[in-house]
Image (tube, grey):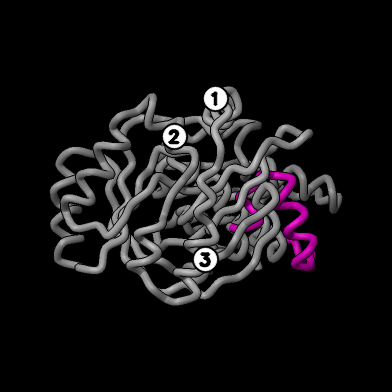
Amino acid sequence: MEKIKLKAYAKVNLSLDILGKRKDGYHEISSIMQSIDLADILEFEKSEIVKIFCDDHRVPLGENNLILKVINLLKAKFQIKEGMLVKLNKKIPLAAGLGGGSADAAATIVALDKLWNLGMSREEKMEIALKIGADVPFCLEGGTKIARGIGEILEDLKGPSMHLLVVKPDIEVFTKDVYNKWDSFGFKSSYVTALVVQAIQEGDIYKIAKNVKNDLELITLQEYPVIKQIKEEMIKKGALGCAMTGSGSAVYGIFDDLQKLSKAYEDLKKIFRFVFISKSIDKGLELYG
């Protein structure tokens, strides 16, 4: 095999409880992560050199790029001499809380395992994923999961199918800043994960939508009133419930009426550049083409 093409799916947080800061600087969380069908497309091809191409000029292609971090880590771990060409068709917006960078890293782990015949076990892939970032283990498998620890302790859930509208305002929110402010303000978690888990187990999208919540909104709403504006507009237009995902700035709404969803999409598309109709899915990655 000389090349492989993958879809790397975004995620939303149906809940995000921040439980405290650890000694290593990470935060303990309790969250429900849900894969959605918005995806980056990545093509990997064996080469003598390592090079990443991307159709979005805002994506950093240097040493901070998570795809490059995975390539360098695996080259060192398995003493691989050859390189890799990566073409990234970026569909998941940056700095949105949708896990785009993490999904791309997860796709890179899977692609390189196949192309370089590394034969990694699930545990080895998860170990590599966690070294790259807290959301990468989830993105390797996707679906609907409870995430604990820093996001690496995962437990499967069987979620009902849901239709969502995702809106990202034209602001960039940086995860580290949001968590630092959470610590400095001394906020306490709203502990909604258990309620959302129960709603998912009952297969009740109305109960899920009623309880979706993200602790980090307490920080982001203070600085970016547009988050509140998007949520209010979605509710007005028929969303059953909505919340910010991750540390922001994307907001999703859950709909049970596809006509209202379509109308909300058309209306919000006139105001915001990144607006997507999406649905929940049961995977994080998929072979493409």
What residue is drawn where x is 85% and y is 53%? Answer: 78
- Disc 3 marks a residue whose amino acid type is Val
Q: Is residue 52 above or below residue 175?
A: below
Q: Secondary structure beneath disc 3? A: helix
Q: Secondary structure beneath disc 1? A: helix
Q: Check contact, mark 2 vs mark 1: CB within 8 A.
A: yes
Residue 123 lies in the magenta-colored region = yes
Q: Which residue is mark 3?
A: 197
- Disc 1 marks a residue whose amino acid type is Phe
Answer left or right for 20 relative to 251. Answer: right
Q: Is residue 136 above or below residue 19?
A: below
Q: Is residue 56 visible to us here? A: yes
Q: Which residues are magenta?
A: 116-138
Answer left or right for 282 relative to 239. Answer: right
Q: Secondary structure beneath disc 2? A: helix
Indicate which disc, 3 or 2, sits on the residue closer to the N terminus.
3
Q: Which residue is mark 2?
A: 218
What residue is drawn where x is 56% and y is 37%? Answer: 188
Indicate which disc, 2 or 1, sits on the residue closer to the N terminus.
1
Which quadrant would the N terminus be assigned to in this image? Answer: bottom right
Query: In the depicted view, which residue is nearer to us: 67 or 115?
Result: 67
Q: Main secondary structure of the magenta part?
A: helix
What residue is drawn where x is 56% and y is 64%? Answer: 142
Q: Is residue 204 above or below residue 100?
A: below
Answer left or right for 113 relative to 280. Answer: right
Q: Is residue 90 visible to us here? A: no
Answer left or right for 249 relative to 85. Answer: left
